Image (cartoon, grey):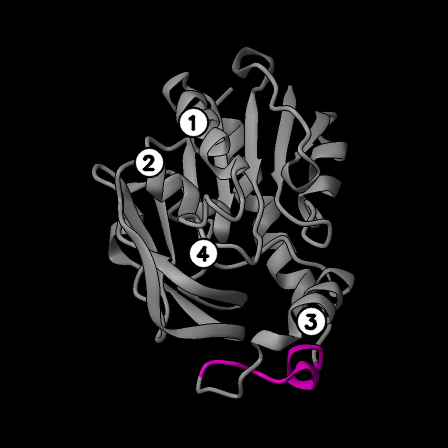
């Protein structure tokens, strides 16, 4: 199997997804959009993972590659591939599936609980996410749910935290893949976003309990295991 990922900035890579994919003996490749690397042919890819980034999906003037990226994601979904979008990646998937992406009522940065929805029981991932868990957030935008998708999770600050489409396309506004070094990189490059508002934690609080990374990474592993099983 071939997993290809789209990377928007140097400091947001695959995180724990890379460890899982290596153990599963996936071929791994990437398009580093910030470096203007070319996109592959859709038929070369089995899984597409779309990472996060500080830009917004509607900033095509500042980031011209966004237009080509959206078209590629749309073709990948239309061709029946497995697609996982994380944070900005989830917003891009929502956008190409016809949903609106817009500024959330507040920023959400730090460790806050997400709550599994009742509708999640209608998906093959119903037992993957716990009913409640603390996860890492770093976003200011949010999205409406795409048509025909299933609402997966919510938080106090953001209603639409995740969705599933056809049991093979997943959008997660939150981060299950981030490692301790990955969070340090985010803090280093994006600390200007830490404005002390209600749902924005200071760096010391975000890094205070390193065991949380193992917990969220294990949930990510379970999610990827299930994706692989139902899309064999």
Residue occupied by mark 4: 173
Closer to the eye: label 2 or 1: 1
In x, y percent, where is residue 145? 26, 49
Disc 4 versus disc 1: distance between alpha carbons?
21 Å
Q: Which residue is mark 3?
A: 187
CB atoms of marks 2 and 1 within 8 Å: no
Residue 26: image location, x then y, percent: 70, 25
The secondary structure that dominates the magenta segment is loop
Q: Is residue 107 above or below residue 69?
A: below
Q: Secondary structure at mark 2?
A: strand
> Which residue carries the number 2 mark?
165
Q: Is residue 215 left or right of residue 92?
A: right
**Which badge, 2 or 1, comes first in the chain's sequence?**
1
The one nearer the camera, 201 or 17, is 201
Tell me where the magenta segment starts and ends, as one range.
199-208
- Give me the C-alpha separation between circle 2 and circle 4: 15 Å
The answer to whether marks 2 and 3 mark residues whose Cβ atoms lie closer than 8 Å is no
**Numbered label attached to residue 71:** 1
Q: Are marks 2 and 4 in contact (CB under 8 Å)?
A: no
Residue 202: say if magenta.
yes
């Amino acid at each position: 199997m071939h997993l290809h990922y789209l990377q928007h900035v140097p400091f947001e890579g695959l995180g724990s997804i890379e460890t899982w994919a290596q153990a599963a003996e996936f071929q791994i490749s990437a398009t580093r959009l910030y470096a203007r690397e070319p996109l592959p042919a859709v038929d070369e890819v089995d899984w597409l993972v779309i990472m996060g980034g500080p830009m917004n999906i509607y900033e095509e003037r500042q980031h011209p590659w966004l237009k080509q990226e959206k078209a590629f994601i749309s073709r990948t979904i239309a061709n029946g591939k497995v697609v996982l979008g994380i944070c900005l990646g989830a917003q891009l998937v929502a956008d190409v599936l016809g949903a609106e992406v817009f500024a959330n009522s507040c920023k959400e940065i730090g460790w806050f609980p997400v709550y599994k929805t009742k509708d999640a029981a209608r998906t093959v991932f119903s037992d993957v996410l716990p009913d409640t868990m603390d996860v890492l957030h770093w976003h200011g935008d949010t999205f409406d749910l795409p048509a025909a998708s299933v609402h997966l999770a919510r938080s106090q600050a953001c209603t639409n935290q995740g969705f599933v489409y056809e049991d093979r396309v997943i959008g997660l506004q939150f981060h299950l893949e981030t490692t301790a070094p990955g969070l340090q990189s985010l803090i280093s490059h994006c600390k200007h976003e830490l404005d002390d508002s209600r749902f924005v934690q200071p760096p010391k609080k975000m890094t205070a309990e390193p065991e949380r990374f193992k917990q969220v990474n294990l949930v990510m592993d379970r999610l990827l295991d299930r994706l692989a099983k139902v899309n064999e």
